[in-house]
Image (cartoon, coloured by chain):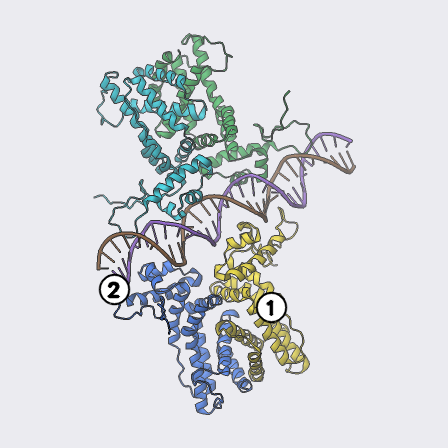
Chain colours: A blue, B yellow, C cyan, D green, E brown, F purple
Amino acid sequence: MVAVMRRRHPLSPTAGRPGRPGRPRSAAADTAILEATRAALVELGWSGLSMSDVATRAGVAKTTLYRRWPGKNELVVDAVAVLFDELELPDRGSLAADVEGVVRQFAALLERPEAKTALMAVVAESTRDEALRARIGASIVERQKRLVLEGRARAQARGELPEAPEGGPPGAGSAVDDLVFDVIAGAVVHRALVSGRPVDTEWVRRFTALLLGGLGAAGD
Amino acid sequence: MVAVMRRRHPLSPTAGRPGRPGRPRSAAADTAILEATRAALVELGWSGLSMSDVATRAGVAKTTLYRRWPGKNELVVDAVAVLFDELELPDRGSLAADVEGVVRQFAALLERPEAKTALMAVVAESTRDEALRARIGASIVERQKRLVLEGRARAQARGELPEAPEGGPPGAGSAVDDLVFDVIAGAVVHRALVSGRPVDTEWVRRFTALLLGGLGAAGD
Amino acid sequence: MVAVMRRRHPLSPTAGRPGRPGRPRSAAADTAILEATRAALVELGWSGLSMSDVATRAGVAKTTLYRRWPGKNELVVDAVAVLFDELELPDRGSLAADVEGVVRQFAALLERPEAKTALMAVVAESTRDEALRARIGASIVERQKRLVLEGRARAQARGELPEAPEGGPPGAGSAVDDLVFDVIAGAVVHRALVSGRPVDTEWVRRFTALLLGGLGAAGD
Amino acid sequence: MVAVMRRRHPLSPTAGRPGRPGRPRSAAADTAILEATRAALVELGWSGLSMSDVATRAGVAKTTLYRRWPGKNELVVDAVAVLFDELELPDRGSLAADVEGVVRQFAALLERPEAKTALMAVVAESTRDEALRARIGASIVERQKRLVLEGRARAQARGELPEAPEGGPPGAGSAVDDLVFDVIAGAVVHRALVSGRPVDTEWVRRFTALLLGGLGAAGD
DNA sequence: TGATAAGCGAGACGGTACGTCTGGTCTTCGA
DNA sequence: TCGAAGACCAGACGTACCGTCTCGCTTATCA
């Protein structure tokens, strides 16, 4: 017997079954709010962004914001999550080329000011907010990780990597997938945001070489 | 002939040569403030921390805080920087063991709640504040990077790694050092804070294998 | 064609026509704030009164204060102005008795600690703030002056004073009215607050005799 | 047997018998401080004046101020008191002319911005500070009142007024003197600062007529 | 001549209030 | 029932002054 909880802040904020009584929520408001949030992030950065300001930019009342998102953290996660929808991994013919592609995609994202300032901030907040961490995982991290899984599957199809021996669910990701993902995403983020140096061709080449060179050793 | 600039907020806030007129700054206040900051971070996290609260905890007036640090960002950097002073790398006899040691040190630090909540937050802020980035680099990043440089030098002394062919200054770090540092620090941070999974023995083993396996390939 | 200006701080702070959108201002807050202001004046005096303290006493947020009054000066003027609403001049049958009545009314007001400490202070501030002077004039001075005009009109009706020959608006007050008002109010205030002596029966008798004795001479 | 109290803040701040050990107080500092106080009053008004600012203007440390005056109130009283030393009453030949002279002297003083802003303010403060009231009385009020006493004595010498029947000390001032002083000073102050109108020739003429006309009646 | 004592500048100190801003909530009206 | 508007409480922000203190130094008197 599962009690159906009344979720006040669903991931898709406007949702709500159609047959519900009363005036339906404006879908246009959602779009305007998320756009306004990204614009505010670009202009003011994470710490300069305020809910009131977003409401004003979006031409919306503060109540409307709080009815859809519980706070600044969640709003920003949703606002930048759409940027990660654009991530794609065209087949470049070899594992090495695909890895370079992934790295460049991550790096390109991190150069967008709205992503740069927001990502680290919401991760920081998520260290004390389990629900926020889950939202980030679902909206952002999984979208990134998908690329890694795709790349691995493609390489196995090409015969560049052996088939995974383990019997987990096919799309779930093994321990090696997790490791590779942490290494790729972590290294790029650290290079770009902590070391503050460009993710340029030379660096991508070296990094890819290191990763591929080490891949065999990590599988055991 | 270099003009010595009057730094208003030096890294060591109390400094100032002794002959300066006026009542000297209380060194005890510095200690109390930094301790109070760490305590507040543990209890309230980054976003819950307020300058007023730190002042109250430290038994100090708000003016005393602002006289020494320009804002919350800088204060927190200094408060957590001392945690990185404890980092050490005992010689464990082999490169692999030393890498595992470094990884564990980083991971242990990131488990401390004051570091966990603060590090990502100040990095996020630093994306829009060049001075803050420099302060983080000097106080925190360099302290971490030192371990990598030491480990590499030790491995070279043992003959596990070839002598670096390039002629830069010995302690400065080559492109490979930078890469290795970004990979290690980035992967550990990503594992711990983004993926939200433990940096356990198994993971450390796999990661070290990957890194060492790839090291030769990245050197070119 | 007169542009209607949007007054941010009208004399009656809560005003605003009913059709205005948004939550209306709480009328109860107004009352509580003005009462709290008078209480704080009695306890702490003008210089000890602080906006924060008034807000706390009134059980109101500071923003609510500042939304209605631009500062301490204006708040205090409004808070003490209501004391002057109680001023009345019952007909005592003769000009001399009426003058004594006015004098006693003024003196009684100046014995109230909230008026004593506030009146001089806001007048002092008004020497460098034209808007404040206007507010004081409308809220306080005019209320006092009305008594003088009434007393004069009554005396004329009784035949104790000749009809005013000049043709100004009947209620506006002539130069003699102004002079008499300045003499009465000024003398009482000076006696009470500067000389620091009681406005007792003897003094009132002497003062009234002086004023009435001189009235004829001043009319030319 | 009167215990000689060690007065920490004598009226003449620099005083102190010459034989006292230690470095004597700088008399130049006194002058500079009082001048700086008047300048600050002109520029910033009473409420804008701060001890720190006065110290800076006078080229003096804050400690030096507080060693001489207990606070802003007392400092300002002393600073404006010297303006009242200039008051003089040349013999103009008749009581009426002398009264007009006194009135003009008061009015001229009240037109000086440093006096205008300071006088009412310190009187307001004095309503809750007995010592301050005494200081104002001695430094300011008595200096004004002296003119009234002189004028009365002169008129008696001329035969314009009867000799006072009472046998009090000659310079002390009778009840009528007190009344006349309160009427003159009060009316002028009220006209200038409360009503906010000029003390011009016409007003002075009318006021003097009223006062002299009423003088006989008040004496009983 | 040297000890003693006070004054002096500079500036840090613990406090308090300022007036503004933001976070979330609540209350009104009109759609 | 939603949405816009805006008032509401709470509390942090960073600044300004308050009046006191702690320095190192100077300038007097007295022994």
The residue under the point 37% across, 74% down is: A1
For disc 2, the neighbor class at 10 Å (few under 14, some 14 to 19, many from 20) is: few
Chain letter for mark 2: A
Residue F18 higher or lower than C210, as above or below: below
Is residue C56 toward the left or the right of residue C135 in the image?
A: right
- The quadrant in which the C terminus of chain A is found is bottom right
Residue on which disc 2 sits: A23
Q: Quadrant of residue C161?
A: top left
Which residue type does callout 1 highlight? Arg
Is residue B109 toward the left or the right of residue A156 in the image?
A: right
Chain letter for mark 1: B
- The residue sitting at the front extreme is A1
Which residue type does callout 2 highlight? Arg
Residue on which disc 1 sits: B143
Residue C115 higher or lower than A61, as above or below: above
The residue under the point 55% across, 69% down is: B111
